[in-house]
Amino acid sequence: MRALIIDDDPVNRLYLQEVLSSYADTASAESGELGLELFRKSMHTSRAFDAVLLDVQMPGMDGHQTLRKIRGMERDAGLTPAEESTVLMISGSGGSQDIKRAFFQGGALSYLTKPVDPDQLIDELRKLGLIV
């Protein structure tokens, strides 16, 4: 599995990379803009991201805006919903508006709250069929 971690907090990025180290080849970005650039580049290679772990609250482009742009790039590339990257939103709050927006407007498949429990993250990835 190949995963992209987009989070403005360097500690969170390192933590998620460590949790995923046995399961995934990871790349990370500290902003939505940089994450989009990495995502865009990966789409044009044989090493596209299977999963995106995306922080909701970031300065500049937040996670919802970033997700909307990711989905737009996928549509523009002609990908079907089954071919889209699996997006897991991660937030310090579990506000119902954020959760609804992530699932219904952005097409996220999971929403985890910080601090992310490593076992819960791995269980989610298993449920989503990304790891065995």
Image (cartoon, helix red, strand yellow):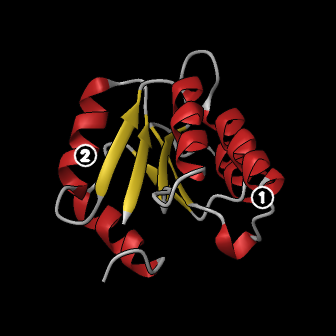
- The percent position of residue 63, horizontal first and vertical second, equals 60, 36
Figure quadrant of residue 97: top right
Q: Is residue 45 left or right of residue 105?
A: left
Residue type indicated by callout 2: Gln
> Which residue is pictured at 74% across the width and 46% down the height?
73
Work out whether residue 25 or residue 18 is closer to the camera in this orientation and state it.
25
Quadrant in which residue 11 is drawn: top left
Task: Identify which residue is drawn at 51% across, 37% down.
Answer: 38
**Mark 1 or mark 2, which is nearer the start of the sequence?**
2
Residue type for callout 1: Phe
**Residue 8, relative to residue 26: is it above or below?**
above
Q: Is residue 111 visible?
A: yes
Which residue is the site of mark 2?
17
Q: Where does the C terminus fall, quadrant-wise?
A: bottom left
As drawn, the label of residue 104 is: 1
Question: Toward the viewer: 129 or 89?
Answer: 129
